[in-house]
Image (cartoon, rainbow, N blue to C red):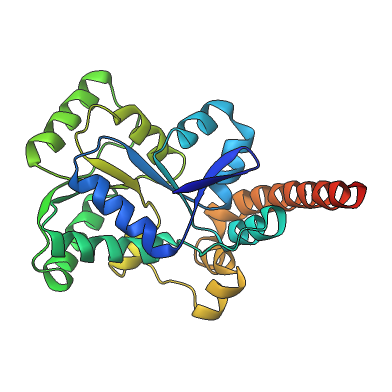
Amino acid sequence: MQKSKLFGMNVNVGPYGAYVDTIVEKARLGESSYACVANVHMLIETHKNYDFAKLVNGASLVAPDGKPITWALRLVHNVRQDRVAGMDLLPDLLRLAEKRGLPVYFYGGTEAMLRQTEDYMKQSFPRLQVAGMYSPPFRALTSEEEDEIAARINASGAKLVIVVLGCPKQEKWMAAMKGRVQAYMVGLGGALPVLIGMQKRAPVWMQKTGFEWLYRLMQEPRRLLSRYVVTNSLFLLLFCKAYMQKKFTHTAS
């Protein structure tokens, strides 16, 4: 899939279905790599942190999750891009993995979330091969612990690993595990709790108008308020700067 550079982050562009097919095919082949599902928060993290930008751009696939990212691709690069929402991508990946017989491993989240995930998979994806689940400690892992986790996932026979740690933690973990975990990893931190019913998703009109973040803010104001104030403001600043540069270049030529 082709890539387009947006504020220092390389974003893959193409129809929605191509992302699902690409991830499942890489998992089938046993590729030890990872996919990032990028929203505005991740985009701003890559802009602020060079090391984080390197590991996101080192992913084999970067999908445009946030609606504002698709708008920026269109207005800055003239690319009409489907939104690849993690909350849509996760059930589609599980559905196809079930159909293709690909074992799936769930890494991250709390013990309670994983218990609910197990129940949900039995009801909604009864033929899905769940290779395993693991809730890691809420702290930095030692190198010995990382080796043990990689060995556990590899021994499970997993082909696809759903990583539920949240940005930027899940992207850092996947980059560190590339070449060690013999499976394809996808960072979908916010999608799993919505899929299994622990959280609610925004109404369709908010999804289409780019206000899904506001719905999440209303659900978790104390955790998300400061983050959204910073990230959304900086995104608007970067977008306006890039758009004006495009308009000036076009006028000058």
In the foreground, 159 or 107: 159
Toward the front, the furthest residue is 253
Residue shown at the point (46%, 39%) measured from the top left: 168
Is the residue 85 above or below the residue 227 in the image? below
Residue 26's quadrant in the figure?
top left
- Left/right placement of residue 71 relative to residue 86 reads right
Residue 59: tell me if it is visible: yes
Residue 93's quadrant in the figure?
bottom left
- Left/right placement of residue 192 relative to residue 240 reads left
- Left/right placement of residue 193 relative to residue 81 reads left
Location of residue 51 in the rendering, given as x and y in whole percent from the top left corner:
53, 26
In the foreground, 123 or 75: 75
- Left/right placement of residue 71 relative to residue 103 reads right
Residue shown at the point (8%, 41%) measured from the top left: 156
Location of residue 34 in the rendering, given as x and y in whole percent from the top left corner:
34, 40
Location of residue 85 in the rendering, given as x and y in whole percent from the top left corner:
45, 62
Residue shown at the point (23%, 44%) measured from the top left: 135
Toward the top, the furthest residue is 143
Residue 70's quadrant in the figure?
bottom right
In the foreground, 139 or 48: 48
Is the residue 5 above or below the residue 142 in the image? below
Toward the right, the furthest residue is 252
Location of residue 98 in the rendering, given as x and y in whole percent from the top left corner:
15, 63
Residue 106: tell me if it is visible: no
